[in-house]
Image (cartoon, rainbow, N blue to C red):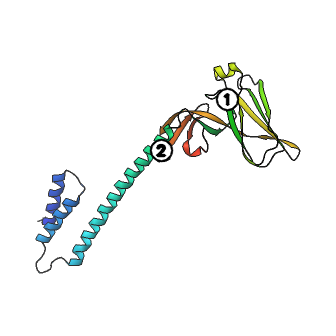
Amino acid sequence: MTTISPITSSATQAMAQTGSKALGQQDFLTLLTAQLKNQDPLNPMDNAEFLGQMAQFSTVSGIERVNDTLSGFGSGMRDMRISMASTMLGHSVLVPGSVAYPDAEGAVRGAVDLPAAVQSLVVSYSDGRTGTLLHSQTLGAQPSGLVGFEWTDLPPEVTAARGPVRVSLSGVQDGSSVNLDPQVYARVLSANAGAGLDDVTLQVEGFGAINTLEIDSFR
């Protein structure tokens, strides 16, 4: 014949009352009380064992509280990132690319990261649809590093239509002409958040979704 111990019976009752397979702090205390009531008087529970069980349960409860706190902190961080990303709506971010659109001021702006100094830097702006040259700038000698450029007096028809403008750059290094990769400022259309803390993306005009961690500059 199978004998059900008082402790097992108490555990079953505790889980039945809570409707859960997981035991909480109150369930643990109920089991511990039953264990103390039904222990062998000639061989009672050792004090060290009793304290060990209490300490173990306290540790588990503490870890659960820490996890809950971290989970709430993570959610708060995510909300903060979304809030920060939303403040960028209507602004422009600097992204690698050669096609730009006139901004709210009717200008095309960008930058180039020069790996070495150049004796001359030329920026050319062309119609993004037809390839027709619209404007050219000679910026002269430039040191290595990030160098900004802008064209503020676009033709009215280009500004009104917000047509694409293709930017190309060339420089002279040690007497030789070199092609350079531009970066352009593009308008932020919307912000989207995923499940992760770093999964916040911006929908950027002409470039699609870009993670905020890839953005170094905005205006």
- Nearer to us of marks 2 and 1 is 1
Residue beneath disc 2 = 81
From what the image shows, is residue 107 above or below residue 11?
above
Q: How far apart are marks 2 and 1 (CA)?
A: 29 Å
Please tell me the numbered disc located at residue 66.
none
Residue drawn at point x = 80 percent, y = 48 percent: 117
Q: Is there any visible trace of residue 5 in the rendered image?
A: no
Residue drawn at point x = 29 percent, y = 61 percent: 61
Among the 4 quarters of the image, the one containing residue 10: bottom left
Residue drawn at point x = 36 percent, y = 56 percent: 67
Secondary structure at badge 2 equals helix
Please tell me the numbered disc located at residue 107.
1
Among the 4 quarters of the image, the one containing residue 79: top left
- Local packing at callout 1 (Cα closer than 10 Å; few below 14, some 14-19, many 20+) is some
Q: In the current view of this chain or complex, which residue is farthest to the bottom?
A: 42
Secondary structure at badge 1 equals loop
- Residue type, mark 1 in image: Ala
Seen in the image, is 208 located left or right of residue 120?
left
Task: Classify the position of the N terminus by image quarter.
Answer: bottom left
- Residue type, mark 2 in image: Arg
Percent x, y of residue 200: 50, 42
Percent x, y of residue 146: 71, 45
Seen in the image, is 49 located left or right of residue 87?
left
- Local packing at callout 2 (Cα closer than 10 Å; few below 14, some 14-19, many 20+) is some
From what the image shows, is residue 36 above or below residue 134?
below
